[in-house]
Amino acid sequence: MPHAKHVGIVAVSAEGAALCYRTICAEGAALLGPHRHPQVSMHTYPLSDYMEHVEAGRWEAAGRLLLQSARLLVGAGAEILICPDNTLHQALDLVRAESPVPWLHIADEVAAVAAARRFTRLGILGTRYLMEGPVYRSALARVDIGCEIPAAARRERINAIIFGELVYGRFEDEARQYFRQVITELGDCGCDAVVLGCTEIPLLVSDADSPLPTLDSTRILARAALREATRGAPGRGHENAS
């Protein structure tokens, strides 16, 4: 097999991490040949461990938990790291410099794709902590893209759907219709695309369901990891990595 770097997935919630893993494995063949993909290792502490810190505002402590996962994965051979959880990137930003190997940043990867597609203002969907936090504001500002978040009541309902349904693998049509309403409102506010900024949302909402073009943060991150892992490795080309 052509050399490809070993990818470590620092997982937080199961459904988003599983989608990220499946994307790397399924789409690896386009880069490396039939049935081939980089080595992938994954580790996760219980979501409850992370949420205890997040709900208390202890972002650095949550970041330390990410680093513990990272070190376990590096011990297993991982050469690059990703975290398919948007919210916890607020914690990652505090400790990323201490990472033993390079770590791809989900919001930076989404921002790069948004810039390449010439979007100018993005609606941000995700947990309340993500929508109200700095992760996407900072990443998008670096590429001169504006952003909007839903109104407060909408944010609370979205947060409830994520933690009450999506992380448990429940993808209900009622929730899908609610997201469509919110996306329509973001379009009315001038957004030309929407970030699916909880890694479970792409399992509920696709471009076919959305009034605006979507930026699927989960698959964007997985594809970025594939590109980085296979950089310089011989194999077949992949034309549409973003």
Image (cartoon, grey):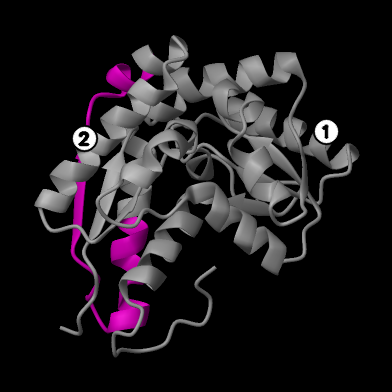
- Sequence-wise, the earlier of marks 2 and 1 is 2
- 91 within the magenta span: no
Question: As displayed, is residue 221 above or below residue 184?
Answer: below
The amino acid beneath tag 2 is Gln
Q: Residue at x 29, y 85 (%)?
A: 233
Question: As displayed, is residue 152 above or below residue 21?
Answer: above
Question: As displayed, is residue 203 above or below residue 50?
Answer: below
- Describe the element under mark 2 as helix, strand or loop: helix
Q: In which quarter of the image is residue 47?
A: top left
The amino acid beneath tag 1 is Glu
Q: Name the residue under label 1.
A: 185
- Describe the element under mark 1 as helix, strand or loop: helix
The reply, left or right, for residue 131 in relation to residue 86 is right
Label 2 to label 1, Cα distance in Å? Answer: 40 Å
Q: Which residue is drawn at 28% across and 18% down?
A: 49
- State which quarter of the image contains the N terminus: bottom left
The reply, left or right, for residue 73 in relation to residue 190 is left
- 50 within the magenta span: yes
Count of numbered marks: 2
Q: Name the residue under label 2.
A: 68
State the residue lying farthest toward the front: 97
